[in-house]
Amino acid sequence: MIIAGMAFIVVNFFVKLLGAQTPHPWFGSLQHYPAHELILARSVVSFVISYYIIKKRGLTLLGNNKKWLLIRGGAGMIALTLFFYTILHLPLVVASILQYLSPIFTVIFALILLKERIKILQWFFIAMAFSGVVVIGYDKLINPELGEQIALFQIGLAILSAAFSGIAYVAIIKLKSTDTPINIVIYFPMISIPVMIFLCLFEFTMPNGIEWLILLIIGIFTQIAQVMMTKAFHEGPTAVVAPFQYLGAIYAFLIGLFIFDEKLSFVVYIGTGLILIGVVFNSLLRKH
């Protein structure tokens, strides 16, 4: 899970870089890419790598539990599309922190779909996490100058992304006993590639020069992150491995501050802190 978190932050960094509307002083002028094109590049690389591994191991392409594999692939595609969009339009640390609401949704959907029990104290920390979202939104209202950085609509999309990630995580838990991690991973590109090709018919940017390499890096590191995350959920209890993904919040904060010059108000940091405390303690309670 630690490796997955480090790989995800590399992906988020380059997605943010290619989505910037203005040239970055460190990397010069790069073209602006829509979220669906970045996901298409990531999906093509992921499919090629996953297909090679599946064929080399002699596994079946479509797996066993096709219903939950489709749910995992579809939910993951929607979650990542919305997440990439929020990375392009929100400060990196805010987009990343809001994505960390996904374990909260995992608990809620596990209650609904897998009939897992939730302790009363867990509901308290769930409420604390969502209160952090309210604090971030409130800061936008009292600091209108942040309107270009933090919009309530984009916060809503980030929460929706976390909800679909929660569904995807529940599917991974459900598929533990029936399918291999690589079979779970390949369903994402199999579903997303045709959808993203269709969207690219309406908006597409032809890569130039080093941008080809950046797109390849996004694809490779996303594949590493997805495989490592899926293996982590496969081989260890969810409540034990899930908290380690929150190390990515530290990476996102440092990259946003020192590379993208994202200076946020103290209120926003209070909101992100409430979210982290809520999700981490919820995961620890789940463990016990």
Image (cartoon, rainbow, N blue to C red):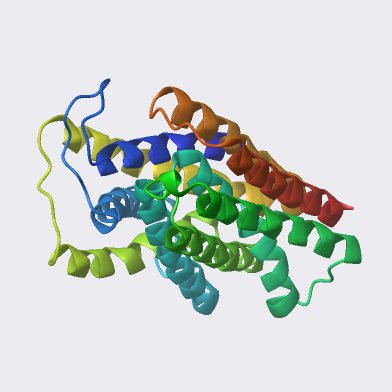
State the image coordinates of residue 44 (x, y, percent, origin top left).
27, 53
State the image coordinates of residue 91 (x, y, percent, origin top left).
44, 42
* Quadrant of the rendering where the N terminus is positioned: top right
State the image coordinates of residue 250 (x, y, percent, origin top left).
59, 31
Residue 1 visible in rendering: no
Q: Nearer the viewer, residue 24 or 114?
A: 24
Name the quadrant containing residue 127: bottom right
Note whether 65 is above or below 257 in the view shown.
below
Q: Nearer the viewer, residue 40 or 235?
A: 40
For residue 115, side relative to residue 141 (left or right): right
State the image coordinates of residue 38 (x, y, percent, origin top left).
27, 50
Looking at the image, which residue is at 31% across and 49% down? 42
- Count of picture labels: 0
Looking at the image, which residue is at 11% across and 31% down? 209
Residue 122 visible in rendering: yes
For residue 269, side relative to residue 46 (left or right): right
Q: Nearer the viewer, residue 103 or 159?
A: 159
Looking at the image, which residue is at 51% across and 39% down? 93
Note whether 6 is above or below 149 in the view shown.
above
Looking at the image, which residue is at 51% across and 79% down? 67
Name the quadrant containing residue 131: bottom right
Note whether 132 is above or below 122 in the view shown.
above
